[in-house]
Image: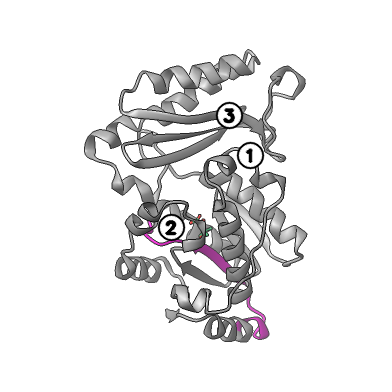
Amino acid sequence: MQIFSTPAEMQAWSDARRTAGQRIGLVPTMGALHSGHLALIDDALTRTDQVVVSIFVNPLQFNEAADFDGYPRPIDDDVAACERAGVTAVFAPTAAAMYPAGFQTRVVPGPLGDVMEGPHRPGHFEGVVTVVAKLFGAVRPHVAVFGQKDYQQLRIITQLAADLEFGIEVVGHPIVRDLDGLARSSRNVRLTEAERSAAVAIPNALDAAIDAAVAGNVDDVVAAATSVLAAEPAATLEYVTVFDAVTLVELDDLTEIPHVRGVARIATAVWFGDVRLIDNRDLYER
Ligand code: PAF
């Protein structure tokens, strides 16, 4: 497995692989790899000949310095995990290599970035889209695999790839969950034991919402999720929203949509102590 630390080295490797007729898969990450990331790598391995994992904690997408500083960076463990998983190259640039002196371009998402997480994390998606455009330019993949846990991010990047003609297939991989249903996230390691136990309220809240969705009243759906979270003293709810799975526009009437998979989703953001967790599910996945 090779490790590259500059976009130029990465591009040279990718160009050689492309010339040899090989298909390149990219799994973009900020490191602290867990089994959710390994599932994305496995997915990319089934679709392409060579899989690149990028590991870069992108300063542009953090709203709070404390969140950026506290983000876990176990780079040696991450590299070892990539090697074991069958990755052919790791792209782990420094911030100076990604954003050298004079760097000034920003890629701004459209309306998909204005809803849900957007108002709560100003500038976040601009930072994500800018770095993903750079990762696409450095790695030049045929396929890029992202997790559905960051569903809004996945939709925004799918739109980015289409709008800017990157010629990259963006794949959304299903959320990987712990046995109790909590979505795997690099942030979970920052939960105390008590917070980790309490965090099961998130999947429980989404379950309750999905049960309520059968009747088709959106207020009842939101209330079902909210009441589960309100009953957990360690949880501070930021939002629960029911939205169109493609446009991300908030839905206020479920009677006008077909109750089938892929049409509507529910998402939430919840704080446990100083850790902010997000999750989402298809409202009619059952
Ligand atoms: O989802 C993430 O880990 C990050 O937002 C990404 C896509 C790697 C960009 O920094």
Earlier along the polypeptide chain: callout 2 or callout 3?
A: 2
> Which span is picked out in magenta?
17-33
The residue under label 1 is which amino acid type?
Answer: Val
What residue is disc 1 on? 115
Crowd tier of the residue under label 1, counting other residues whose Cα lies within 10 Å: few below 14, some 14–19, many 20 or above: some
Location of the C terminus (image quadrant): top right
Query: How far separated are the C-alphas under marks 2 and 1?
Result: 29 Å
Q: Position of residue 127 (x, y in %)?
A: 56, 59
Residue at left 66%, top 69%? Answer: 142
Query: How far separated are the C-alphas under marks 3 and 1?
Result: 10 Å
Labels 3 & 1 near each other (Cβ < 8 A): yes
Element type where label 2 sits in the image = helix
Q: Nearer the viewer, mark 2 or mark 1?
A: 1
Residue at left 53%, top 74%? Answer: 99
Earlier along the polypeptide chain: callout 3 or callout 1?
A: 1
Residue 241 marker: 3
Q: Is residue 90 above or below residue 38?
A: below
The residue under label 3 is which amino acid type?
Answer: Thr
What residue is disc 2 on? 38
Q: Nearer the viewer, residue 139 or 238?
A: 238
Crowd tier of the residue under label 3, counting other residues whose Cα lies within 10 Å: few below 14, some 14–19, many 20 or above: many
Horizontal side of 171 relative to 32 (left or right) equals: right
Mark 2 near ligand 1 (CB under 8 Å)? no
Based on the picture, tell me whether residue 277 belongs to the magenta stretch. Answer: no
Element type where label 3 sits in the image = strand
